[in-house]
Amino acid sequence: MNDSAKWQELEREIAARLKLGRRPVAVAYLDAEPAGIKKFEGTEPSGCSFWRLAAEGRTFYTVPENHFNCAIGAYTHNIPLSPEREKETEQTLKMMFKLGYVQPEEVPQIPRLAKGPKAVIYSPLGEAPAAPDVVLFACKPAGAMLLQEAANRAGVSSGAPALGRPTCMALPAALQHGAITSLGCIGNRVYTGLGENELYVVLRGADLAKVATALKTICSANAALQDYAKGRREQLSTL
């Protein structure tokens, strides 16, 4: 099976088992701009906005300048801002501090990419033109449960608690430590259209095949345990 067919099969298999409402997004960090892939044209308010475009079926790559509109996303992706844009970072953080959304001592603890990319490819998983570094799954809680249980069975879970804001820190966190659950943040939910009943699970691309294999067992086990729990509820519930 070639790489293209592999990603197609993994998306098909995982999406069916998790009953995903949107396509999983493959993200690849590169040291140079790729050939044969469309370069992003236009503007978006954040790096996570590119997730929305990829989930809708678009394949493209960005360069660092495309990420300048979101100071927080540039920070998590280790993308240096131009001097005039650095002032925006300070202003954004001051606003968040004033609102009580973030405390100053939290900033150094936010995960970041070890090295800033020269280009980033975004695509639906099944159409990934290069091996993804990380894959994003927007799931309902029941699907996220199955995916995290599969990651645990495959031995690739980070063991970290669910992350909150900013959502984009889940990508470097997963890359460094393994499968991560992210509850999302309000900015991400606005920019991507993530539903109130959805959250993210982020996997390393290198772990995807192992998790897909484990997911078969996990889904079968959960189906059996669901029947078992229903029977016990019928037998033992008195109210």
Image (tube, rainbow, N blue to C red):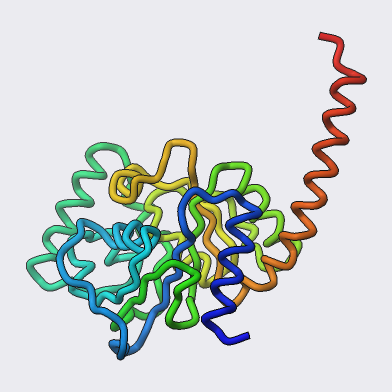
Q: Which residue is drawn at 66% across and 54% down?
A: 17
Q: Residue at x 85, y 16 (%)?
A: 237
Q: Looking at the image, which residue sits at the far left?
A: 84
Q: Which residue is drawn at 41% across and 60% down?
A: 169
Q: Looking at the image, which residue sits at the far top?
A: 239
Left/right of residue 189 with respect to residue 158 in the rendered view:
left
Q: Position of residue 43 (x, y in %)?
A: 16, 63
65 lies above or below 182: below
Q: Looking at the image, which residue sits at the far right?
A: 235
Q: Residue at x 27, y 66 (%)?
A: 74
24 lies above or below 39: above
User: Which quadrant holds the C terminus?
Assistant: top right
Q: Please name whichever residue, 219 or 70, is drawn nearer the observer in this view of the structure.
A: 219
42 lies above or below 39: above
Number of numbered discs: 0
Left/right of residue 124 with respect to residue 203 in the rendered view:
left
User: Which quadrant holds the N terminus?
Assistant: bottom right
Q: Where is residue 13 in the image (x, y as percent from the top left)?
A: 64, 63
Q: Position of residue 31 (x, y in %)?
A: 34, 88
Q: Where is residue 29 in the image (x, y as percent from the top left)?
A: 39, 79
Left/right of residue 225 with respect to residue 142 in the rendered view:
right
Name which quarter of the figure residue 97 lies in.
top left
Name which quarter of the figure residue 45 lies in.
bottom left
Q: Please name whichever residue, 20 or 172, is drawn nearer the observer in this view of the structure.
A: 20
Left/right of residue 32 with respect to residue 226 in the rendered view:
left
Name which quarter of the figure residue 25 lies in.
bottom left
